[in-house]
Amino acid sequence: MVSRDRVESVLDRIRPLMQADGGDIELLDVQGNSAKVRLTGMCAGCPSAHMTLYMGIEIVLREEIAEFEELQVV
Amino acid sequence: MRTVFEFVNVVSRSSSSVIVTGETGTGKEMIANLLHYRSARRDAPFVATSCALFSETLIETELFGHERGAFTGAIRDKAGRFELAQGGTLFLDDIDDVPLSVQVKLLRALQNREIERVGGTRTIPIDVRIITGTKRDLKQMVGEGRFREDLYFRLNVLSMVLPPLRERRDDIPDLVRHFVAKYARTRGVPVPELSPVVQQALQRYQWPGNVRELENVCERLVQTCTCGTVRIGCIAASVLFAAPPKADAVSVAFPQPTRPVSLDDRLRAVESNMIAWALKVADGNKSKAAELLNIKRSTLGDRIIRCGLADTQPSRNNDPQPAH
Protein backbone atom coordinates (compact mmCIF):
# COMPACT_ATOMS: atom_id res chain seq x y z
CA MET A 1 0.00 0.00 0.00
CA VAL A 2 1.35 3.38 -1.00
CA SER A 3 0.19 6.24 1.15
CA ARG A 4 -1.38 9.29 -0.39
CA ASP A 5 1.18 11.46 1.36
CA ARG A 6 4.10 9.72 -0.30
CA VAL A 7 2.63 10.11 -3.76
CA GLU A 8 1.77 13.70 -3.00
CA SER A 9 5.30 14.44 -1.79
CA VAL A 10 6.76 13.09 -5.04
CA LEU A 11 4.27 15.10 -7.06
CA ASP A 12 5.20 18.17 -5.05
CA ARG A 13 8.69 17.89 -6.46
CA ILE A 14 7.43 17.84 -10.03
CA ARG A 15 4.81 20.54 -9.50
CA PRO A 16 6.97 23.67 -9.54
CA LEU A 17 8.10 22.75 -13.03
CA MET A 18 4.56 22.40 -14.27
CA GLN A 19 3.21 25.39 -12.42
CA ALA A 20 5.92 27.57 -13.89
CA ASP A 21 4.48 26.67 -17.27
CA GLY A 22 0.89 27.38 -16.28
CA GLY A 23 -0.10 23.80 -15.61
CA ASP A 24 -0.67 21.63 -12.60
CA ILE A 25 -1.31 18.10 -11.57
CA GLU A 26 -4.06 17.02 -9.24
CA LEU A 27 -3.93 13.79 -7.28
CA LEU A 28 -7.41 12.32 -7.42
CA ASP A 29 -7.06 8.96 -5.81
CA VAL A 30 -4.58 6.42 -4.51
CA GLN A 31 -5.67 2.81 -4.59
CA GLY A 32 -3.31 0.06 -3.53
CA ASN A 33 -0.06 0.79 -5.30
CA SER A 34 -1.62 2.84 -8.08
CA ALA A 35 -2.59 6.47 -8.36
CA LYS A 36 -4.98 8.51 -10.44
CA VAL A 37 -4.11 12.05 -11.45
CA ARG A 38 -5.54 14.80 -13.58
CA LEU A 39 -3.63 17.42 -15.55
CA THR A 40 -5.01 20.91 -15.24
CA GLY A 41 -4.16 24.30 -16.72
CA MET A 42 -2.22 24.93 -19.89
CA CYS A 43 -1.29 21.39 -20.88
CA ALA A 44 -4.60 19.81 -19.91
CA GLY A 45 -6.07 19.54 -23.40
CA CYS A 46 -2.92 18.56 -25.27
CA PRO A 47 -2.60 14.88 -26.18
CA SER A 48 1.18 15.16 -26.51
CA ALA A 49 1.47 16.57 -23.03
CA HIS A 50 -0.67 13.76 -21.69
CA MET A 51 1.65 11.18 -23.13
CA THR A 52 4.84 12.89 -21.99
CA LEU A 53 3.74 13.76 -18.52
CA TYR A 54 2.09 10.42 -18.01
CA MET A 55 5.33 8.64 -18.85
CA GLY A 56 7.55 11.08 -17.03
CA ILE A 57 5.57 11.22 -13.84
CA GLU A 58 5.18 7.48 -13.70
CA ILE A 59 8.94 7.02 -14.09
CA VAL A 60 9.63 9.46 -11.27
CA LEU A 61 7.04 7.83 -9.02
CA ARG A 62 8.52 4.40 -9.64
CA GLU A 63 11.99 5.66 -8.91
CA GLU A 64 10.97 7.22 -5.65
CA ILE A 65 8.50 4.58 -4.50
CA ALA A 66 9.78 1.12 -5.27
CA GLU A 67 6.42 -0.62 -4.96
CA PHE A 68 4.53 1.90 -7.09
CA GLU A 69 2.64 0.19 -9.88
CA GLU A 70 0.50 2.23 -12.17
CA LEU A 71 -0.31 5.84 -12.90
CA GLN A 72 -3.59 6.73 -14.51
CA VAL A 73 -4.07 10.09 -16.13
CA VAL A 74 -7.73 10.97 -16.48
CA MET B 1 33.72 26.06 -31.07
CA ARG B 2 34.73 29.26 -32.81
CA THR B 3 38.34 28.16 -32.42
CA VAL B 4 37.40 24.93 -34.15
CA PHE B 5 35.94 26.76 -37.14
CA GLU B 6 38.88 29.10 -37.39
CA PHE B 7 41.17 26.10 -37.33
CA VAL B 8 39.09 24.48 -40.08
CA ASN B 9 39.62 27.56 -42.23
CA VAL B 10 43.35 27.41 -41.66
CA VAL B 11 43.86 23.72 -42.31
CA SER B 12 41.23 22.97 -44.95
CA ARG B 13 43.59 23.98 -47.77
CA SER B 14 46.19 21.45 -46.81
CA SER B 15 46.09 17.78 -47.66
CA SER B 16 47.43 16.56 -44.34
CA SER B 17 45.71 13.97 -42.23
CA VAL B 18 43.41 15.19 -39.49
CA ILE B 19 42.20 13.46 -36.35
CA VAL B 20 38.88 14.76 -35.08
CA THR B 21 38.27 13.76 -31.48
CA GLY B 22 34.84 14.20 -29.95
CA GLU B 23 32.06 12.39 -28.13
CA THR B 24 29.23 10.85 -30.07
CA GLY B 25 27.02 13.46 -31.70
CA THR B 26 29.44 16.36 -31.44
CA GLY B 27 29.72 16.75 -35.21
CA LYS B 28 32.86 14.89 -36.24
CA GLU B 29 31.51 13.98 -39.66
CA MET B 30 30.19 17.49 -40.17
CA ILE B 31 33.66 18.90 -39.56
CA ALA B 32 35.19 16.34 -41.92
CA ASN B 33 32.65 17.33 -44.54
CA LEU B 34 33.46 20.98 -44.03
CA LEU B 35 37.17 20.30 -44.32
CA HIS B 36 36.59 18.55 -47.62
CA TYR B 37 34.35 21.15 -49.21
CA ARG B 38 36.68 23.96 -48.17
CA SER B 39 39.67 22.18 -49.66
CA ALA B 40 41.11 22.04 -53.16
CA ARG B 41 39.68 18.52 -53.33
CA ARG B 42 36.10 19.73 -53.18
CA ASP B 43 35.29 18.52 -56.70
CA ALA B 44 36.52 15.02 -55.96
CA PRO B 45 34.47 12.59 -53.87
CA PHE B 46 34.03 12.77 -50.10
CA VAL B 47 33.64 9.26 -48.77
CA ALA B 48 32.64 8.65 -45.19
CA THR B 49 32.53 5.32 -43.48
CA SER B 50 32.37 4.08 -39.93
CA CYS B 51 34.91 1.48 -38.96
CA ALA B 52 32.65 0.26 -36.19
CA LEU B 53 30.08 -0.96 -38.69
CA PHE B 54 31.98 -3.95 -39.93
CA SER B 55 33.55 -7.03 -38.48
CA GLU B 56 37.30 -7.42 -38.64
CA THR B 57 37.38 -9.16 -42.01
CA LEU B 58 34.74 -6.96 -43.53
CA ILE B 59 36.57 -3.74 -42.72
CA GLU B 60 39.36 -4.89 -44.97
CA THR B 61 37.21 -5.48 -48.04
CA GLU B 62 35.30 -2.33 -47.20
CA LEU B 63 38.41 -0.18 -47.14
CA PHE B 64 40.57 -1.84 -49.76
CA GLY B 65 38.00 -3.62 -51.92
CA HIS B 66 38.35 -7.15 -53.25
CA GLU B 67 38.89 -9.06 -56.47
CA ARG B 68 36.39 -11.40 -57.97
CA GLY B 69 36.78 -14.85 -56.42
CA ALA B 70 38.83 -13.64 -53.47
CA PHE B 71 36.44 -15.48 -51.16
CA THR B 72 33.09 -17.22 -51.30
CA GLY B 73 30.51 -14.73 -52.39
CA ALA B 74 32.97 -12.34 -54.00
CA ILE B 75 31.26 -12.63 -57.33
CA ARG B 76 32.62 -9.47 -58.82
CA ASP B 77 35.40 -6.98 -58.28
CA LYS B 78 34.61 -4.38 -55.70
CA ALA B 79 36.37 -1.11 -55.23
CA GLY B 80 37.15 -0.23 -51.61
CA ARG B 81 36.55 3.09 -49.94
CA PHE B 82 40.09 4.20 -50.64
CA GLU B 83 39.55 3.81 -54.36
CA LEU B 84 36.13 5.43 -54.23
CA ALA B 85 37.64 8.46 -52.57
CA GLN B 86 40.39 8.72 -55.19
CA GLY B 87 41.51 12.33 -55.42
CA GLY B 88 39.19 13.36 -52.60
CA THR B 89 38.79 12.85 -48.89
CA LEU B 90 38.18 9.67 -46.94
CA PHE B 91 36.60 10.07 -43.53
CA LEU B 92 37.16 7.07 -41.31
CA ASP B 93 34.93 7.39 -38.29
CA ASP B 94 35.38 5.33 -35.11
CA ILE B 95 39.00 4.65 -35.96
CA ASP B 96 39.40 3.65 -32.33
CA ASP B 97 37.35 0.53 -33.11
CA VAL B 98 39.73 -0.75 -35.78
CA PRO B 99 41.47 -3.95 -34.64
CA LEU B 100 45.26 -3.98 -34.46
CA SER B 101 45.57 -6.37 -37.41
CA VAL B 102 43.82 -3.93 -39.74
CA GLN B 103 45.76 -1.02 -38.31
CA VAL B 104 48.94 -2.49 -39.82
CA LYS B 105 47.34 -2.57 -43.24
CA LEU B 106 46.05 0.95 -42.87
CA LEU B 107 49.50 2.11 -41.95
CA ARG B 108 51.01 0.45 -45.02
CA ALA B 109 48.41 2.05 -47.25
CA LEU B 110 49.03 5.47 -45.84
CA GLN B 111 52.79 5.15 -45.76
CA ASN B 112 53.20 3.92 -49.34
CA ARG B 113 50.15 5.71 -50.73
CA GLU B 114 49.07 2.53 -52.43
CA ILE B 115 46.70 -0.33 -51.68
CA GLU B 116 46.04 -3.87 -52.78
CA ARG B 117 42.56 -5.27 -53.00
CA VAL B 118 41.84 -8.37 -50.98
CA GLY B 119 42.85 -11.33 -53.11
CA GLY B 120 44.46 -9.07 -55.68
CA THR B 121 48.05 -8.70 -56.74
CA ARG B 122 47.79 -5.36 -58.45
CA THR B 123 48.95 -2.35 -56.44
CA ILE B 124 46.73 0.64 -56.86
CA PRO B 125 48.21 4.07 -56.19
CA ILE B 126 45.94 6.24 -54.09
CA ASP B 127 45.71 9.97 -53.61
CA VAL B 128 43.37 10.45 -50.71
CA ARG B 129 43.26 12.81 -47.78
CA ILE B 130 42.52 10.92 -44.61
CA ILE B 131 40.39 12.39 -41.87
CA THR B 132 39.74 10.17 -38.90
CA GLY B 133 37.11 10.46 -36.23
CA THR B 134 37.48 9.02 -32.76
CA LYS B 135 35.50 9.20 -29.54
CA ARG B 136 38.40 8.03 -27.40
CA ASP B 137 41.73 9.67 -26.89
CA LEU B 138 43.99 7.87 -29.35
CA LYS B 139 47.12 8.91 -27.55
CA GLN B 140 45.89 7.23 -24.42
CA MET B 141 45.02 4.13 -26.45
CA VAL B 142 48.55 4.12 -27.77
CA GLY B 143 49.79 4.15 -24.19
CA GLU B 144 47.54 1.18 -23.40
CA GLY B 145 48.84 -0.70 -26.42
CA ARG B 146 45.46 -0.76 -28.15
CA PHE B 147 46.44 1.55 -30.97
CA ARG B 148 49.62 1.38 -33.02
CA GLU B 149 51.92 4.24 -32.29
CA ASP B 150 53.23 4.47 -35.85
CA LEU B 151 49.70 4.68 -37.24
CA TYR B 152 48.83 7.29 -34.65
CA PHE B 153 51.73 9.50 -35.72
CA ARG B 154 50.86 9.02 -39.38
CA LEU B 155 47.25 10.10 -38.80
CA ASN B 156 47.97 12.78 -36.28
CA VAL B 157 49.37 15.57 -38.41
CA LEU B 158 46.56 17.92 -37.44
CA SER B 159 44.39 17.35 -34.43
CA MET B 160 41.04 18.86 -33.52
CA VAL B 161 38.96 18.35 -30.41
CA LEU B 162 35.22 18.98 -30.49
CA PRO B 163 33.77 20.00 -27.14
CA PRO B 164 30.73 18.14 -25.81
CA LEU B 165 27.53 20.16 -25.76
CA ARG B 166 27.43 20.35 -21.96
CA GLU B 167 30.68 22.29 -22.08
CA ARG B 168 29.29 24.89 -24.44
CA ARG B 169 25.86 25.48 -23.03
CA ASP B 170 25.85 29.06 -24.27
CA ASP B 171 25.31 27.66 -27.76
CA ILE B 172 22.22 25.66 -26.79
CA PRO B 173 19.65 28.46 -27.40
CA ASP B 174 21.03 29.17 -30.88
CA LEU B 175 21.13 25.49 -31.77
CA VAL B 176 17.58 24.99 -30.51
CA ARG B 177 16.34 27.95 -32.52
CA HIS B 178 18.06 26.63 -35.61
CA PHE B 179 16.74 23.07 -35.34
CA VAL B 180 13.22 24.09 -34.32
CA ALA B 181 13.02 26.44 -37.31
CA LYS B 182 14.41 23.74 -39.57
CA TYR B 183 11.85 21.13 -38.53
CA ALA B 184 8.99 23.61 -38.52
CA ARG B 185 9.90 24.37 -42.13
CA THR B 186 9.95 20.70 -43.09
CA ARG B 187 6.62 20.14 -41.42
CA GLY B 188 5.17 23.32 -42.93
CA VAL B 189 4.02 24.84 -39.66
CA PRO B 190 4.82 28.22 -38.12
CA VAL B 191 7.87 28.17 -35.88
CA PRO B 192 6.57 27.48 -32.36
CA GLU B 193 7.67 29.53 -29.39
CA LEU B 194 9.37 27.89 -26.43
CA SER B 195 8.17 28.62 -22.94
CA PRO B 196 10.85 29.77 -20.47
CA VAL B 197 10.52 26.54 -18.51
CA VAL B 198 11.25 24.51 -21.61
CA GLN B 199 14.25 26.66 -22.38
CA GLN B 200 15.55 26.16 -18.87
CA ALA B 201 15.05 22.42 -19.05
CA LEU B 202 16.98 22.24 -22.33
CA GLN B 203 19.69 24.40 -20.84
CA ARG B 204 20.01 22.24 -17.74
CA TYR B 205 20.04 18.84 -19.38
CA GLN B 206 23.33 16.97 -19.65
CA TRP B 207 23.03 16.03 -23.36
CA PRO B 208 24.93 12.75 -23.38
CA GLY B 209 24.13 12.43 -27.10
CA ASN B 210 25.29 15.99 -27.72
CA VAL B 211 24.10 17.94 -30.78
CA ARG B 212 22.60 14.85 -32.39
CA GLU B 213 20.39 14.34 -29.35
CA LEU B 214 19.50 18.02 -29.27
CA GLU B 215 18.44 17.86 -32.89
CA ASN B 216 16.19 14.88 -32.20
CA VAL B 217 14.62 16.58 -29.22
CA CYS B 218 13.89 19.66 -31.35
CA GLU B 219 12.36 17.51 -34.07
CA ARG B 220 10.14 15.95 -31.46
CA LEU B 221 9.15 19.33 -30.05
CA VAL B 222 7.97 20.49 -33.44
CA GLN B 223 6.13 17.24 -34.12
CA THR B 224 4.27 17.08 -30.82
CA CYS B 225 3.41 20.72 -30.27
CA THR B 226 -0.29 21.24 -30.87
CA CYS B 227 -0.84 24.75 -29.57
CA GLY B 228 1.89 26.94 -31.06
CA THR B 229 3.88 27.24 -27.86
CA VAL B 230 6.14 24.48 -26.68
CA ARG B 231 5.48 23.88 -23.01
CA ILE B 232 6.88 21.27 -20.70
CA GLY B 233 4.31 18.77 -21.88
CA CYS B 234 6.03 18.54 -25.24
CA ILE B 235 9.58 17.76 -24.18
CA ALA B 236 10.58 14.14 -23.92
CA ALA B 237 10.19 12.90 -20.38
CA SER B 238 13.80 11.76 -20.39
CA VAL B 239 14.99 15.33 -20.85
CA LEU B 240 12.51 16.87 -18.48
CA PHE B 241 12.90 14.50 -15.60
CA ALA B 242 16.50 13.53 -16.20
CA ALA B 243 18.40 12.89 -13.04
CA PRO B 244 21.00 15.55 -12.43
CA PRO B 245 24.57 14.44 -13.04
CA LYS B 246 25.39 11.76 -10.55
CA ALA B 247 27.20 13.16 -7.57
CA ASP B 248 29.11 10.84 -5.31
CA ALA B 249 29.06 11.23 -1.58
CA VAL B 250 31.73 13.89 -1.61
CA SER B 251 30.77 16.18 -4.44
CA VAL B 252 27.65 18.23 -3.95
CA ALA B 253 25.61 20.08 -6.52
CA PHE B 254 27.35 23.23 -7.59
CA PRO B 255 25.63 26.42 -6.57
CA GLN B 256 24.36 29.00 -9.01
CA PRO B 257 27.39 31.01 -10.10
CA THR B 258 25.69 34.25 -9.14
CA ARG B 259 24.97 33.46 -5.50
CA PRO B 260 27.64 33.29 -2.82
CA VAL B 261 27.65 30.17 -0.65
CA SER B 262 29.18 29.33 2.66
CA LEU B 263 31.78 26.61 2.21
CA ASP B 264 31.56 25.73 5.91
CA ASP B 265 27.81 25.21 5.70
CA ARG B 266 28.21 23.03 2.64
CA LEU B 267 30.92 20.94 4.27
CA ARG B 268 28.85 20.55 7.41
CA ALA B 269 25.88 19.42 5.32
CA VAL B 270 28.02 16.76 3.64
CA GLU B 271 29.45 15.72 6.98
CA SER B 272 26.12 15.37 8.69
CA ASN B 273 24.70 13.51 5.69
CA MET B 274 27.53 11.01 5.82
CA ILE B 275 27.28 10.57 9.58
CA ALA B 276 23.52 10.11 9.44
CA TRP B 277 24.00 7.54 6.69
CA ALA B 278 26.65 5.64 8.67
CA LEU B 279 24.51 5.65 11.79
CA LYS B 280 21.58 4.33 9.85
CA VAL B 281 23.58 1.59 8.19
CA ALA B 282 25.15 0.65 11.52
CA ASP B 283 21.72 0.58 13.15
CA GLY B 284 22.67 3.33 15.54
CA ASN B 285 25.82 1.55 16.71
CA LYS B 286 28.35 4.36 16.92
CA SER B 287 31.43 2.14 17.01
CA LYS B 288 30.32 0.44 13.81
CA ALA B 289 29.43 3.77 12.23
CA ALA B 290 32.87 5.15 13.12
CA GLU B 291 34.43 2.12 11.46
CA LEU B 292 32.37 2.70 8.33
CA LEU B 293 33.57 6.28 8.14
CA ASN B 294 37.14 5.31 8.93
CA ILE B 295 37.36 7.64 11.91
CA LYS B 296 37.82 7.06 15.64
CA ARG B 297 34.79 6.37 17.79
CA SER B 298 35.59 9.44 19.93
CA THR B 299 35.92 11.64 16.84
CA LEU B 300 32.55 10.48 15.63
CA GLY B 301 31.02 11.44 18.99
CA ASP B 302 32.47 14.93 18.70
CA ARG B 303 31.29 15.36 15.16
CA ILE B 304 27.79 14.16 15.97
CA ILE B 305 27.54 16.87 18.57
CA ARG B 306 29.07 19.48 16.26
CA CYS B 307 26.59 18.68 13.51
CA GLY B 308 23.70 18.77 15.96
CA LEU B 309 22.86 15.16 15.19
CA ALA B 310 22.92 14.09 18.82
CA ASP B 311 19.19 13.40 18.79
CA THR B 312 19.11 11.58 15.52
CA GLN B 313 17.34 8.31 15.86
CA PRO B 314 18.62 5.90 13.27
CA SER B 315 15.15 4.51 12.84
CA ARG B 316 13.84 7.76 11.43
CA ASN B 317 12.25 7.16 8.07
CA ASN B 318 13.61 10.02 6.09
CA ASP B 319 17.19 9.92 7.22
CA PRO B 320 19.26 11.86 4.79
CA GLN B 321 21.45 9.64 2.72
CA PRO B 322 24.42 10.44 0.63
CA ALA B 323 23.73 10.25 -3.05
CA HIS B 324 25.28 7.24 -4.68
Image (spheres, coloured by chain):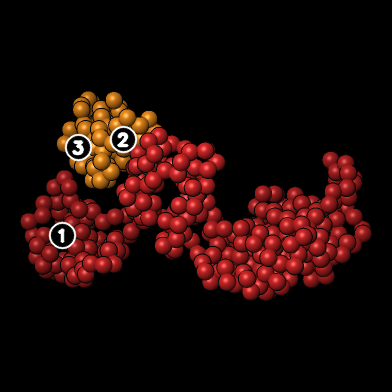
Whole-angstrom CA distance, mark 1 to mark 2, is 51 Å
In this rendered view, identify the residue nearer to me: B141 or B4: B4
Residue drawn where x is 23% and y is 67% of the image:
B259
Q: Which amino acid does label 3 sit on?
A: Glu
Q: Which mark is residue B286?
A: 1
Q: Which amino acid does label 1 sit on?
A: Lys
Residue lying farthest front? B190
Determine whether, in the image, residue B176 is placed left or right of residue B100.
left
Q: Name the residue under label 3.
A: A8
Q: Which of the two labelled residues, at mark 2 and mark 3, occupies the earlier sequence position?
A: 3
Q: Which amino acid does label 2 sit on?
A: Cys
Between label 2 and label 3, give the one nearer the viewer: 2
Say which quarter of the image contains residue B111: bottom right
Q: Any idea which chain is the red one in this picture?
A: B
How crowded is the residue under tag 1: few (<14 C-alpha within 10 Å), some, or many (20+)?
A: many
* Residue B12, placed above or below residue B191: below
* Mark 2 touches mark 3? (CB < 8 Å): no
Q: What element carries label 3?
A: helix
Whole-angstrom CA distance, mark 2 to mark 3, is 20 Å
* Residue B209, placed above or below residue B101: above
Determine whether, in the image, residue B212 is placed left or right of residue B244.
right
Residue drawn where x is 82% and y is 68% of the image:
B113
Whole-angstrom CA distance, mark 1 to mark 3, is 35 Å
Q: Position of residue B300 (x, y in %)?
A: 16, 66
- Answer whether residue B57 is visible to the viewer in this image: no
Answer yes or no: are tags 1 and 2 on the same subunit.
Answer: no
Which chain is disc 2 placed on?
A
Answer yes or no: are tags 2 and 3 on the same subunit.
Answer: yes
Determine whether, in the image, residue B147 is placed left or right of residue A35.
right
Say which quarter of the image contains residue B301: bottom left
In this rendered view, identify the residue nearer to me: B3 or B191: B191
